[in-house]
């Protein structure tokens, strides 16, 4: 039987044959497999090659858990709105930064540049807008009735537009002097994002449900898109008049925030519009689109609910979903030159580039924070605002000098001995590849795991030195200053510790019940009734492996003297199993073989070959076909008592007697081994009629029955037959005289 591939690894290669034990091999050699791991300044291209990714450096660490929003003043200075202390930080182009304003409220979700070099700061909860001058001095500017300020933008005349939420999702227009009027109110609880289209019309996104509206100058709405997701987190416009919409399936990205947000009902939304600019990044990794990944079995086809999606609304109003993810929640998108898109995601801070037709996602790398929440891209630099922890990071146009790839945890399903670690790589001069391993007995690495082993540098094969355990993980380190090494595959061999086979589900069918083979050769064949052992193993007809289930049985029929025994054999190592069947008579201690080396978990016992009596059966499963002789193990299971009886009941009729107009006859039925199950009689060839003893119960090996007939029945032939519980039949006849 072919070895079953374990479902926990997409690329598990079985190296053992059906006649000997051998190691299995975990191999990562495709893009989808590598994307299951964790990458630090490493990219994976469309061909499944690991290489150094763009260098990613922290520009400024705010010391806060969350950066909710960011805005660039156009001259190289960046402002960051944070939580949970409501602080605004100012970061200069050199990377020098400091707190610019400390708001009374807990969160700053919205920022917008004010005329004259000032800054509008929108806070939550108890939403207020402050106007902060260049020196950091703040003045209350607008205090709406709503609890949250989610987004702000200005127009050419200097008016401020404020998106709010709870109890109403509303947009206000606020003049430079602070006079505010409601512009648009939606049925949704929150308006969480804003942008302007090519005609400078205001476009807003709502939460619960996630919809996009375009507003005219008077605030009259037109629905552009119903995303069918919960929140429209960001809206960005490109120079071609297209709008790109980032939608999430749950508020605040769910677990992305790590449960530490002070106001859990509030979306974690960066709210400042981003200029439409270009970015050039040289190192990248290509990820299949959703449809392509599904076709190739990639990571995006791993199942689960959609966590977020990106939609495109063309200038003519036509809308289309262009990307979705089931693993990474999108937070922001920035249109790039040539029609490409840069996407910021959580919960592992991945950056993607979307381009091509059909669309393909390019993995650029990971930022240090768990969420990449907002993008600030220009021709000269690419900045990313992050949360968990709150910081501003820069994505360089050159590759990193050092990067690591850590595989997903591989599960051997049982304690395993580790074999050889090997990889294939191209290593330019001055570059090198190092690979280390660690092992443990918990699915998540913790303090109980071994430390990382010494780095191996011989890709042709190095013995894994991590301790014997159930789980293994490897880490690839790429080093190269002038050029990046390229790793195309990594493999690790292991051998499960042999585990004892298990026999379960033993069923002894009623005597005489047999089953035809489901794949008959034309003649009537009984499944499990064979003289051979190995020769009649299940073959290439789609039947299940004997080590993983009971056999497929055909139509049920009856054959006197045969007893069908079916069981289930399992082996945790996936070894091929053979089965031995033995029996002993009740009270005996010695076992007698019935059949050995069976490949099918079914056997039909011809009970005529043994005396009548009570027997116990034992099924023994052996993995000797797949294991060395000194490591082979056997598992056993015994049946309950099985009754064997091939002797028919003896039926005796006493002489008939007459009393008045009735003739009576007494019938005695006796069986040596089995209770009487049924007694019937027929008079002169008429239909069979049941007969019962005086107590009405047929329940013993000896029964006495009296039959009574009219006197006119004298001279007729009476036939009586008795059947025991093992279907043996005894018959006698006599004339009524």
Image: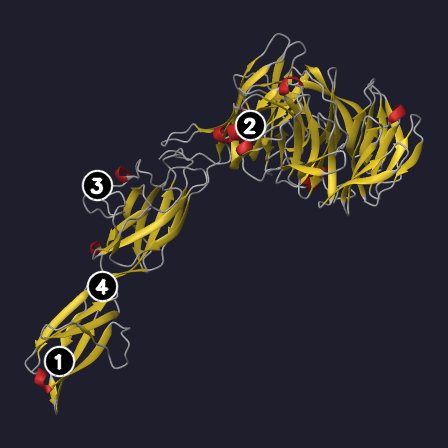
How many residues crowd mark 1 within 10 Å: few (<14), some (14–19), many (20+)? few
Which circle, 2 or 3, is nearer the viewer?
2
Using the numbered discs, state the Cα–Cα distance from disc 1 to disc 2 in whole angstroms. Answer: 90 Å
Sequence order check, earlier mark of 4 and 1: 1
Using the numbered discs, state the Cα–Cα distance from disc 4 to disc 2 in whole angstroms. Answer: 66 Å
Please give the residue where the numbered disc 3 appears in the rendered image.
Answer: 521
Which circle, 3 or 1, is nearer the viewer?
3
Please give the residue where the numbered disc 1 appears in the rendered image.
Answer: 654
Q: Quadrant of the C terminus?
A: bottom left
Sequence order check, earlier mark of 4 and 2: 2
Assign a secondary structure to mark 2.
Answer: loop
Which circle, 4 or 3, is nearer the viewer?
3
Assign a secondary structure to mark 1.
Answer: loop
- The answer to whether the residues at label 1 and label 2 have Cβ atoms under 8 Å apart is no
Please give the residue where the numbered disc 4 appears in the rendered image.
Answer: 727
Sequence order check, earlier mark of 2 and 3: 2
Q: Which residue is drawn at the image coordinates 60% and 14% (left, top)?
A: 485
Which circle, 4 or 2, is nearer the viewer?
2
How many residues crowd mark 3 within 10 Å: few (<14), some (14–19), many (20+)? few
Q: Which residue is drawn at the image coordinates 87% and 41% (left, top)?
A: 143
Q: Which residue is drawn at the image coordinates 20% and 47% (left, top)?
A: 524
Assign a secondary structure to mark 3.
Answer: loop
Sequence order check, earlier mark of 4 and 3: 3
- The answer to whether the residues at label 4 and label 2 have Cβ atoms under 8 Å apart is no
The front one of 430 and 728 is 430
């Amino acid at each position: 039987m072919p070895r079953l591939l374990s479902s926990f690894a997409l690329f598990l290669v079985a190296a053992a044959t059906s006649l000997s034990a051998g190691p299995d091999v975990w191999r990562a050699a495709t893009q989808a497999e590598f994307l299951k791991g964790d990458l630090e300044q490493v990219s994976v291209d469309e061909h499944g090659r690991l290489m150094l990714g763009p260098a990613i450096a922290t520009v400024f660490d705010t010391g806060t858990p969350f950066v909710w929003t960011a805005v660039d003043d156009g001259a190289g200075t960046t402002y960051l709105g944070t939580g949970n202390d409501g602080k605004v930080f100012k970061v200069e182009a050199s990377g020098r930064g400091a707190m610019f304003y400390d708001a009374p409220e807990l969160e700053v979700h919205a920022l917008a540049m004010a005329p004259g070099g000032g800054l509008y700061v929108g806070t939550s909860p108890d939403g207020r807008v402050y106007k902060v001058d260049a020196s950091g001095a703040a003045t209350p500017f607008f205090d709406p009735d709503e609890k949250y300020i989610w987004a702000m933008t200005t127009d050419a005349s200097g008016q401020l537009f404020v998106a709010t939420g709870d109890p109403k999702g509303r947009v206000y227009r606020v003049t430079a002097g602070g006079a505010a009027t409601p512009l648009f109110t939606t049925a949704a609880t929150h308006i969480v994002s804003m942008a302007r289209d090519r005609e400078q019309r205001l476009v807003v996104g709502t939460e619960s449900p996630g919809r996009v509206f375009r507003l005219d100058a008077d605030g009259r709405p037109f629905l552009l898109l119903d995303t069918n997701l919960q929140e429209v987190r960001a809206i960005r416009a490109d120079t071609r008049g297209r709008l790109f919409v980032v939608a999430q399936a749950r508020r605040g990205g769910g677990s992305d925030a790590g449960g530490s947000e002070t106001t859990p009902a509030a979306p974690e939304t960066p709210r400042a519009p981003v200029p439409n600019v270009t970015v050039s990044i040289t190192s990248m990794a290509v990820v299949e689109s959703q449809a392509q990944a599904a076709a190739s079995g990639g990571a995006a086809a791993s199942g689960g609910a959609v966590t977020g999606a990106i939609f495109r609304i063309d200038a003519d109003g036509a809308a289309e979903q262009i990307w979705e993810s089931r693993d990474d929640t999108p937070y922001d998108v920035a249109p790039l030159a040539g029609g490409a898109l840069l996407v910021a995601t959580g919960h592992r801070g991945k950056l993607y580039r979307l381009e091509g037709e059909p669309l393909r996602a390019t993995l650029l790398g990971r930022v240090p924070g768990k969420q990449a929440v907002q993008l600030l891209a220009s021709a000269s630099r690419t900045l990313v605002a992050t949360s968990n922890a709150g910081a501003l990071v820069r994505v360089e146009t050159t590759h990193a000098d050092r990067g690591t790839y850590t595989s997903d945890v591989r599960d051997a399903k049982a304690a395993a001995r580790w074999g050889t670690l090997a990889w294939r790589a191209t290593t330019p001069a001055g570059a090198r590849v190092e690979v280390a391993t660690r092992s443990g007995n918990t699915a998540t690495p913790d303090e109980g795991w071994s430390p990382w082993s010494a780095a191996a540098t011989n890709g042709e094969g190095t013995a894994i030195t991590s301790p014997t355990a159930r789980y293994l993980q490897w880490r690839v380190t790429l080093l190269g200053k002038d050029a990046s090494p390229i790793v195309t595959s990594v493999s690790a061999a292991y051998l499960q510790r042999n585990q004892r086979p298990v026999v379960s589900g033993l069923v002894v069918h009623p005597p005489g019940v047999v089953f035809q083979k489901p794949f008959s050769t034309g003649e009537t064949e009984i499944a499990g009734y064979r003289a051979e052992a190995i020769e009649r193993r299940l073959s290439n007809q789609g039947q299940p492996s004997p080590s993983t289930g009971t056999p497929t049985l055909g139509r049920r029929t009856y054959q006197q003297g045969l007893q069908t025994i079916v069981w289930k054999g399992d082996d945790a190592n996936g070894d091929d199993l053979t089965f031995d069947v033995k029996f002993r008579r009740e009270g005996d201690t010695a076992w007698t073989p019935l059949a050995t080396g069976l490949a099918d978990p079914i056997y039909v016992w011809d009970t005529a070959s043994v005396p009548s009596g009570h027997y116990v059966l034992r099924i023994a499963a052996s993995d000797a076909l797949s294991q060395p002789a000194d490591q082979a193990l056997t598992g056993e299971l015994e049946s309950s008592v099985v009754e064997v009886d091939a002797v028919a009941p003896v039926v005796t009729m006493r002489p008939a007697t007459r009393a008045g107009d009735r003739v009576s006859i007494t019938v005695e039925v006796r069986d040596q081994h089995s209770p009487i199950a049924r007694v019937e009689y027929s008079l002169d060839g008429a239909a069979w009629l049941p007969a019962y003893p005086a107590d009405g119960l047929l329940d013993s090996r000896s029964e006495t029955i009296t039959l009574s007939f009219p006197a006119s029945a004298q001279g007729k032939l009476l036939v009586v037959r008795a059947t025991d519980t093992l279907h043996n039949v005894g018959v006698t006849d006599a004339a009524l005289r």
